[in-house]
């Protein structure tokens, strides 16, 4: 979120943006190696894996728009990717029955 809050076009905005994009790309690609055969899946891939192409596509769209000088499209793509890849995916991981969800709800909060 630092890239979203820093002055647009500044060195801090670019640095935070590059770091975030790098980390999100690594996370998206590495998540392809996390398979789950105990839930609804297709060759070990569960519905949450659909966020991988959404993340990669959003990043690609944002950089393409930036290269063309379409700042409004860049801003929309980055905000949407942040919302989908971080917020929505984060909420999915905290659902009861998932590893991190169980750690939080049962072990952490005692619910």
Image: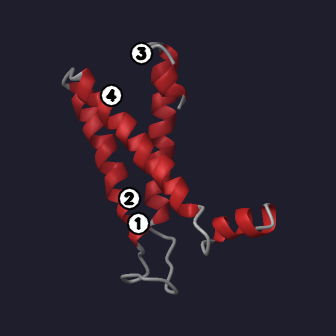
Residue 52 disc label:
2
Question: Does 25 appear above or below 46?
Answer: above
Residue sitting farthest toward the front: 111
**Location of residue 53 (image quadrant):** bottom left
Question: Does 80 appear above or below 18?
Answer: below
Residue at x-position 39% and y-position 70% = 47
Residue at x-position 38% and y-position 43% = 81
Separation of residues labelled 1 and 3 (CA atoms): 31 Å
- Give percent across and percent down for residue 51: 38, 58
Separation of residues labelled 4 and 3 (CA atoms): 10 Å
Separation of residues labelled 3 and 2 (CA atoms): 27 Å
Q: Secondary structure at mark 1?
A: helix
Sequence-first disc among 1 and 3: 3
The residue under label 1 is 49
Cβ atoms under marks 2 and 1 closer than 8 Å: yes
Sequence-first disc among 1 and 4: 1
In this figure, which colouring scheme has been used for the structure? secondary structure
Q: Secondary structure at mark 3?
A: loop
Separation of residues labelled 2 and 4 (CA atoms): 20 Å
Residue at x-position 31% and y-position 44% = 58
Separation of residues labelled 1 and 4 (CA atoms): 24 Å
Q: Secondary structure at mark 2?
A: helix
Sequence-first disc among 3 and 2: 3
The residue under label 3 is 8
The residue under label 4 is 75
């Amino acid at each position: 979120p630092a890239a979203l809050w820093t002055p647009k076009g500044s060195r801090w905005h670019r640095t935070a943006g590059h770091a975030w994009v790098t980390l999100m790309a690594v996370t998206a690609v590495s998540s392809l190696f996390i398979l789950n055969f105990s839930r609804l899946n297709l060759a070990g891939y569960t519905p949450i894996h659909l966020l991988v192409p959404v993340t990669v596509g959003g990043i690609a769209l944002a950089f393409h728009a930036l290269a063309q000088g379409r700042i409004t499209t860049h801003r929309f793509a980055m905000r949407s990717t942040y919302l989908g890849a971080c917020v929505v995916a984060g909420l999915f991981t905290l659902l009861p029955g998932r590893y991190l969800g169980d750690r939080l709800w049962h072990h952490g909060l005692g619910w």
